[in-house]
Image (cartoon, rainbow, N blue to C red):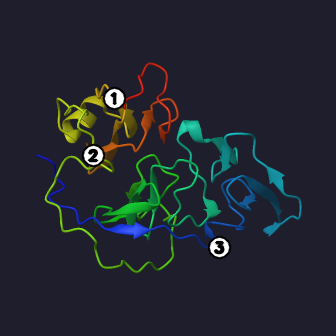
Amino acid sequence: MSKLCSVTMFLIVLGFGDASKVGLCEVCLDSNNAACRNENTFSICYDGKITSTITPCPPNSVCTTDRQICRLTAQGFTPICYEENCNNCNNGALFTCLTQTTFGICSGHAILEMHCPEGRVCNIHSQELCVPYETNQPSCLSVFTTPKPTTTESSSTTEFTTTSSSTTLPPPLDANEFCAGIGIAGYFKTNDPTCKEFAYCYILSGQYLGLYFNCDGYYNPETTKCQKHPPAGCEETL
C-alpha cells in the first residue's frame, strides 16, 4: 500500500506574474571563483568582486558551484541561480511549483494541488521535484493562498488522473512497486496501450515511491511530456 495515505486535491486557476531570482545569484563562489548571473550565465570574480563580463554557458548546461562552473543538466546538475518559477504550466509542463512546499499537476487551464513530504521543498529543476530543504532552494518563494476546494478530499492512495478514460487499463503494479522496480527517479511510460498514462517516480527516505497520472492527450516517453498527438508506436484513440 502506498505511504501516501491521503491527498487533498484542489482545482486552481493558473496565474502568471513577474519572476524574481532565486538561489545563489551574483555571489562570488570560492569553489570556482565565479558568480552565477542567472541559470545559464556567469561572470568571473577578481579579488572577491564580480567582473562586468557576462559569459553564457554552453547549450544544455547550467551555472553551478562545480569547479567547471557550467555543467550539463543531463548529468544531474541543477542551476544554483534561476528565476522564481511559480504556477507556470507553459510549454507542455507536467508539474509546477505553487509554493515552497506545494506543487501542482498541470491539466489544461487548471492545476491539481499536492504537497511535498515533510522536510522537502518543490524545485522544478530537480528530477525528484520534492527535494530536501537543507541542500536545495525552492523554485517558488511567493506566498500562495489556496482557494476553497472545488472537490472533496480524496482517499485515493496510488493513482491520480487528470482525465477519465474508459479505455485505460489498470497497471499490473501499484505505483510504488512500479518505481521500486525501475530504481530511477523521473517520469516513465507504463504498460497502458493508449499511451495516456505515465508514472512519476521519486526518492523518499531512501525508497523509490511513485504516482500514476494520465495526460489529456498522449504521453511521449522521449520528451517526458504530454502532447496532443500520439507518439511513434501509439495509435490515436477516439
Amino acid at pointer 2: Ser
The residue under label 3 is which amino acid type?
A: Asp
Sequence order check, earlier mark of 1 and 3: 3
The alpha-carbon separation of the residues under discs 1 and 2 comes to: 12 Å
In this picture, residue 101 sits left or right of residue 70: left
- Quick check: 152 above or below 170? below
* Mark earlier in primary sequence (3, 2): 3
- Which residue occupies 53% across, 61% down? 88
Q: Mark 2 points at which residue?
A: 164
Alpha carbon of mark 1 to alpha carbon of mark 3: how far?
A: 38 Å
Q: Can residue 135 be seen in this view?
A: no
Where, quadrant-wise, is the C terminus in this rendering?
top left
User: Label 1 is placed on what type of residue?
Assistant: Thr
Residue sticking out furthest to the top: 233
What residue sits right under mark 1 in the picture? 194
Q: Which residue appears at 40% of the width and 45% of the height?
A: 216
Q: Residue at x 75, y 41 (%)?
A: 58
Q: In which quarter of the image is residue 217?
A: top left
Q: Which residue occupies 65% across, 73% down?
A: 18
Residue picked out by circle 3:
18
Disc 2 is placed on an element classified as loop
- Residue 110's image quarter? bottom left
Residue 2 picture location, percent across and down = 15, 48
